[in-house]
Image (spheres, coloured by chain):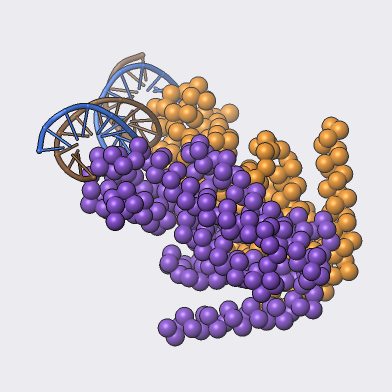
Chain colours: A orange, B purple, C blue, D brown
Amino acid sequence: MKTRDRILMVSLALFNRDGEPNVTTVDISHELDISPGNLYYHFKGKDELVNELFERFYEQMNLILRAPQKQTLATEDYWFYLIVLFEQIYDYRFLYRNISLISQRYEHIKRPLHRLLKLTIDSCSTVCQQMHTAGLLNTRQEQIGLLANSMALTITYWFNFDNLVTERTDDDYGMIRDGVRQVMSLITPYLGDLGDSFLDAINTLYIKQVHDEHHR
Amino acid sequence: MKTRDRILMVSLALFNRDGEPNVTTVDISHELDISPGNLYYHFKGKDELVNELFERFYEQMNLILRAPQKQTLATEDYWFYLIVLFEQIYDYRFLYRNISLISQRYEHIKRPLHRLLKLTIDSCSTVCQQMHTAGLLNTRQEQIGLLANSMALTITYWFNFDNLVTERTDDDYGMIRDGVRQVMSLITPYLGDLGDSFLDAINTLYIKQVHDEHHR
DNA sequence: GTCTATATAGGGATAGAC
DNA sequence: GTCTATCCCTATATAGAC
């Protein structure tokens, strides 16, 4: 594996673990057992490092978030869709952990990040609209905007919130599971009769997963 | 006004405007037209400054968040309650803007901040429980936990989210109004028949406020 | 490509005069 | 209480040898 790529991988890991503002170029090079000078041979500076990580994230997110607009998902796929989305964010959660600061400090990231957030709302909106059209979602038109906001807000800040409130270790997959569940809970009240059975299904799956983890 | 208090006030204003990590002790003293040395005469350092601001916030929040547990609110007061809560957070929004970082950097703040978040969830839970008992909230017991989570998450990150997504100027009162509306929207689907009229009432008030602002 | 050594800058903090 | 001067530390970044 090329040094350049190793730097990117280790940086991502450290940023996610300790938070981007708390990780220095010296920390990164030390973790890699290379000299700081070497790191600066591969990257002009910390900026370029963060920018490149963001770029990779951006490409992926763009694909994921635009998927619902390209083709209507099957009902049973919404669940899966959320998992994919959460897993992607989880991999680059450092970007969301100090989102204001990163948006301020890294000029190149500011605009595309803003676009991603807008896109997240749009994507949620599209999904709701599709469910509404399919007769699944029993909601008034003006509620959809608010609902999409709530979904996007939850998606954006879930790991942040969970991290502050619970005592989970950072690599706990339950973070993702609970995040998906939390977003789902925003939709269930609009599902009408389906809602209850849907809720039961989620809870069964939820309890099953917790059970599985416990006995692993 | 004593210098010590002026320092606190100006610090709060700068933290809120630019974000705590971007404000230095030199910035603060410069804004006050005093020397950095003078600032350090009144406060041991930036830590003590932030800690004291947080303490004031903590006292207030404690009072507000415990109110619902002390006595059941009248139905029409929930709206008002949310406004009070959002206004308090707005005054110290710098604490929420970089909440992870502040929780990491300021050891003294970590635990009480954690308690405040827990308390926020509890408070939301209590309110939901009360509405449920009063027959207003048509929800299954296990949904209340998730609902309280969503409310707390929205309350915690609203200004953050709004700030990233909209182009509002920071002193726009609409931030608070929309935040309240967003939290309310989480409850409305459970209000049954009342929900629609409630939703209409919110929207009327909302449109009225926007209209008023526009013609001020 | 990688190293060592070092420059630079900024923020936090103190000493001592007034 | 307030100021000036200054120190220290840390993080970013560069120069030049290997």
Find residue B138 and report its image quarter. bottom right
Residue drawn at x 43%, y 45% as measured from the top left: B52
Q: Position of residue B51 (x, y in %)?
A: 45, 43
- Horizontally, is B89 left or right of A40 in the view? right
The C terminus of chain B, quarter of image: bottom left
Residue drawn at x 77%, y 58% as measured from the top left: B144
- Residue B77 visible in image: yes
- Horizontally, is A142 left or right of C15 in the view? right
Find residue B161 and report its image quarter. bottom right
- Residue A85 visible in image: no
Relative to A145, does residue D17 appear above or below in the rendering? Answer: above
- Horizontally, is A9 left or right of B149 in the view? left
Q: Position of residue B150 (x, y in %)?
A: 68, 58
Q: Nearer the viewer, residue B79 or A152?
A: B79
Q: Position of residue B29 (x, y in %)?
A: 27, 48
- The tally of labels here is 0
Q: Nearer the viewer, residue A143 or B147?
A: B147
Relative to C13, does residue A184 appear above or below in the rendering? Answer: below
Residue drawn at x 88%, y 50% as measured from the top left: A204
Q: Nearer the viewer, residue B182 or A181?
A: B182
Relative to B184, does residue A80 appear above or below in the rendering? Answer: above
Relative to D1, does residue A130 appear above or below in the rendering? Answer: below
